[in-house]
Image (spheres, rainbow, N blue to C red):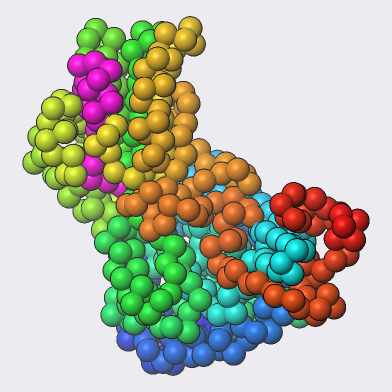
Amino acid sequence: MNDALQPVLLAGAWQPSREPTGSFRAADPATGAAIGPAFPVSGGSDVEAAVAAASAVAAELAAAPAERIAAFLEAYADALDADADTLVALAHAETALPAPTRLRGNELPRASGQLRQAAKAVRGYAWTHPVIDTAAGLRSHLAPLSKPVLVFGPNNFPFAFNAVAGSDFASAIAARNPVIAKAHPLHPATSQRLAQLAHQALRDSGLPAAAVQLLYHFDHGIGLRLAGDARLGAIGFTGSRAGGLALKAAADAAGVPCYAELSSVNPVFLLPGALAERGAALAQEFFASCTLGSGQFCTNPGVLVVPHGADGDAFAAAAAAHFAAAAPMVLFSAGGVEHVARGVDTLRLAGAQVLATAPTDGQGGFRYPPTLLAVDAADFLARPRELQTEAFGPVGLLVRTADAGAMLAVARALEGNLTGTLYRAADGSDDAAWRAIAPVLRARVGRLINSKMPTGVAVSPAQNHGGPFPSTSHPGFTAVGMPAAIRRFAALHSYDGVPDALLPVELRDANPGGVPRLLDGQWTVADVAARA
């Protein structure tokens, strides 16, 4: 059976799966037809070999010069750009995402750009946060875990969050940790091609070949056992709340940090002045954001808080017209269609009414009609958990409020989210309401947004693609933005009275590289002697 299956990247080489428990193929979401070659479902032998091989090279990678790590990340980024035609074709076939705009024009450049930003952070030691206390004789910095990092890739970003190319991957490698990448089974050929490019760049850089390994799929039980393996240094996960929490429970039992992005409805508050000023434009903006990528964004605006009254009613009618006129949208998988349908059923059973849904078109494939629902604030407050169910697709819920006080009550009932948005009028008439609601919303979101939809996530050092539970498993870390994303996969190392020559380079007295350091309570690039 191994001869008919694609090889895995294991222990530094492409080789047959050792004891596959099954096989699978990708599917074309637009038609539902199976495409491409067969890939193995790895068994326990593959997983054990991956952990052993990664553990064996962890110390070597941790000791690698920063320049070599940065060179690998940049060479890999260059390889992605040079192989764009092949990568885009593979990803388009497996995801049906638009090739010229989404994949080539946005996501692939974002993936290579993240790798280059990680390389810059490596060269500048920005992620290590060096601290020197000369009076106490103590020096500390963030350093490699010296253990493997297990990365689970999601279904919705075949490049920018791919387990073997995305932000989690770049962050873990930048922190000088080996990566065991678990591809998402919806785009195995894309992940394979990315891993081939990473493997070649790794070999060319002189880093240990087992520093990057790829497994395409394994069953739930093996995944839980792997997550609970104390030889791991950390886990990066993007996916469903149920799957992430199961992995986190297994990891917690073994003392393995699990940084999981789980779910988010990304509430948007439309304040009265903004509605009066530009309600029709906001209806179009909301529809475009809610249906972008068929609604399969973790920052999709799933809940809109809209006042009652003429302006709010006009907005709801305009938004409903956009949803009703749209065609059913292609999702990634049959399972994705079932998940969205269950989410909509949950919202309806909790009291939400369907305002509009697109007619079916009989085209086949994995499609779901854009759907807009509505519920009164009183009903939302009576069943807030059910009415914050994430329907991961082109689905939005309007929560209709009587006044600013009801908006504030809705804000207080929200779970933790990646983003929260407040739309305000340009003339300042909403500013008092903004000031009342924003502090409540601020405590419940990772990124507070003013007057724009949340679907865009800039790759910036100031970005926070994280938030309070249940949007993520930890409110203090982001999955996007260097150097902060790198710090998830690092350990705090302190040195007490260690001679200068034996210290890590960014903690020594001399600072020829101009690394910003917290020296005796002040940030500076000066040498220790110069500050004495």
Q: Is residue 395 magenta?
A: yes
62 left or right, relative to 275: right
398 to 297, vertically: above or below? above
Looking at the image, which is closer to me, 478 or 24? 478
The reply to whether residue 91 is in sight is no
- Observer able to see residue 433: yes
Quadrant containing the N terminus in the rendered view: bottom left
Q: Answer with the quarter of the image where residue 46 lies.
A: bottom left
Residue plotted at (41% across, 21% down): 435
Q: Residue at x 59, y 50 (%)?
A: 481
Q: Name the one closer to the observer, 472 or 357.
A: 472
Answer whether residue 351 is magenta in the image: no
Where is residue 109? Give x, y as percent.
Answer: 63, 49
Residue 476 picture location, percent across and down? 48, 53
- Closer to the camera, 63 or 314? 63
The quarter of the displayed image where residue 95 is located: bottom left
Q: Which residues are magenta?
A: 387-410
Q: Position of residue 230 (x, y in %)?
A: 43, 83
In the image, taking residue 274 as reference, residue 399 lies left or right, namely: left
